[in-house]
Amino acid sequence: MSRSPLALQRIARAALNAGVLCGLAVSAAPATGARQADSIVIEPASLTLEVGETAQLTATVMDSAGNPIPDIQVVFFSGNRRALTVTPSGHVSANQPGQHQVTALLPDQAFDGNWDYYSSRDPGLRASIPVSVAVPGLTDIFFEDAPPRVWVGTEVPFRLAGRDGAGAVRRGLEAGYATSDAGVAVVDQVGMASFLTTGSVQVAAMHGEMTIYHEVEVLPNPTVRVALDAPDPSEVRTGDVLQFRAATLDASGDEIAGPAIRFAVESRPDPFRPESLGAGAPAQVTPDGRFVAEQPGVYTVVAMSGDRLARQTVRVVPRNVQREVEFLGHARVSDRVTGDLWVWEGVDGRDYAVHGTWNAEGHAYFYDVTDPRNMELIDTVQVDARTVNDVKVSEDGTLCVISREGASNRRNGIVMIDCTNPHDVEILSSFDQGLTGGVHNVFLDNNHVYAVNNGRRWDVVNVEDPRNPFRVSRFETDTPGRSVHDVWIRDGIAYQAGRSDGLIMVDVGGGGMGGSPNTPVEMGRFPQITGWNHAVWPFRSPSTGKLYVIGGDEAFYLNPRRPDAGGILWEEGIPSRAKGWLHFVDFTDPDNPEEVARFELADSGPHNLWVDWEEEIMYVGYYDAGLRVVDVSGDLLGDLYRQGRQIARFFPEDNEGFLANAAFTWGPQPHKGTIFLADFNSGLWAVRLKDPAADAGGN
């Protein structure tokens, strides 16, 4: 195997990429004309649009005397392509409100870096204009789930929502509130109404020039006492969820249907546990009575209906799930950066791993990892690409599929490789029809490859005969500015991660909605308000039977050394710092998904993850925070990190890495008791969790 120095890689890429702009159709100027160019004039010089509106921009390249240069075409791109879509020819579509920017670029053909549609580092001539997309005005406002009847002494939230001119529902509107009779009911600034005596009363909400009224009948409260019950609260750890159940009872002790119950919690340190002193004792209880604590302490849960209430006290102790990590082995990659990995048992019973390489020369590396302490590089494959980002291997260990980005002929797609003998792998075929814009992630399931196509959709390719693959379907949402970054298949359901599109479940044969690989059928979705949704993993909890879909954010801090360059600063040789967190969405009812928990580190963000369903353990490649191992057993609610659910951490730092001593963990995979991880800056690693009994206090 030959590995070129970075300088030679860049020269090679320059030769491959001369005049190629990642699949965008651009007419480049002759070299002499490009050198004469002095400025670009965009018309119009600014845009103001409504959501859903479109406009056409034109750009003229001028010489130093201010004269237009004919027959030179620039390429347009958007600073936020999800909020504002711009075609290379300048057709603008407004998808989301805000202040945006469109740039016209005359590429520098000598540039040997990476030009792509998401963000350009090309040093060529450019000009930008501002685009203002106004927030659509509301056409009406309404209360969500406002009751027609309530009971004296109860409190009810009045949630205001509105519908805008684009037909979108906007929730959580700020408003002014009032009641028609303060002797019957009062309402606070967030819409919580307290009902004081019997009668009829109107609750009003005012938003801008619009006002809405809702009539409520206040009835006598028949509650004599409140009963409060919970599972055995005698031994509760941080992160354990207790389901409190409350009932309103009449004078005969019979349960009454109707009177509203509210929950509250009081917290205080535990005097018998010094670790809780001074740390506070934060906890929460949901409106349906689910209680969880993040810190050890003593908690009193209260259930109330009018002036009737019941209490129950809970002592919470530390979770104590920490374990030590044992380092096993490292296969260094230092002359280029490392992509994602896959580990599998081969047909010969030995264990193997493969990983891609990123912004280099299109290599995938194959290893024998049967002995994790002595992982051996056994073969390589090179394809026409800058990046082999993703790799997957079939369950029978005979077929490997890799993704391609940055091909010299702009035909990217996927490559099928026979890995029956990982010591001598063979390229069988490639498939790029309709996949020329670049494939970032793939999934291989039941003789079908699900290929994320140019960040817009995923195509399904039949590889039953891997020498003759063919497309059978594709799935794409109709969301303006739609984006998909990852897709994962489990039990006939495809789980999609899509930036601002969020999380989507699709039946491809196991969802009970008539779907198949040939006919994908959407089952449900959950929008991601941060717009950073990057990775996805389904997790059916054996403890609770609940289906969680975990969505991982991906974002990066602005680096003060290069504030003009976002994202991963690999070319600059500057360690990058990620941010974001893992979102746990309860998809047990796909029609009503609910975000219930998170795992968040204060100063870093996740990349890829893996959840062991049986062990109920999550493994996360947490970029500059290394590997994180997390307990996801039981009901999940609240901030899992603050609850002490982190089992272990490991920083794969290498003083001979591509960037020395800079952990940037790309993805983990547990396999036969070993945790394998690919690190962007240093290659392939293997570690193991020690037996809890031998840890004597954790790491």
Image: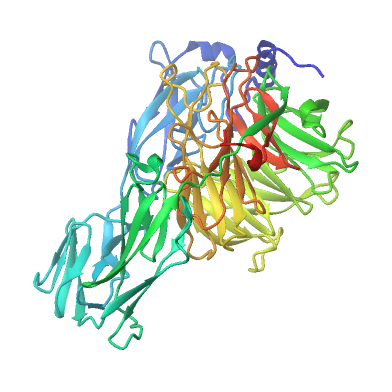
Q: Is residue 675 left or right of residue 467?
A: left
Q: Is residue 185 left or right of residue 297?
A: left
Give the residue at x 53% y 44%: 320
Let me know if residue 19 appears in the view: yes
Q: Quadrant of the N terminus?
A: top right
Return the x and y of residue 439 as percentages of the image width and height. 66, 39
Return the x and y of residue 124 as percentages of the image width and height. 50, 18
Q: Which corner quadrant of the image does residue 434 belong to? A: top right
Q: Is residue 661 left or right of residue 365?
A: left
Give the residue at x 60% y 58%: 541
Return the x and y of residue 567 as percentages of the image width and height. 50, 28
Q: Judge by depth and name the residue closer to the eye, 2 or 25.
A: 2
Most distant residue in the front direction: 272
- Relative height, residue 79 to residue 670 (above, below): above
Return the x and y of residue 384 as percentages of the image width and height. 74, 28
Q: How is the image coloured?
A: rainbow
Q: Which corner quadrant of the image does residue 402 belong to? A: top right
Q: Quadrant of the C terminus?
A: top right
Q: Which corner quadrant of the image does residue 93 belong to? A: top left
Looking at the rendered structure, the number of numbered marks drawn on it comes to: 0
- Relative height, residue 104 to residue 190 (above, below): above
Q: Judge by depth and name the residue closer to the eye, 636 or 242.
A: 242
Q: Judge by depth and name the residue closer to the eye, 234 or 437.
A: 234
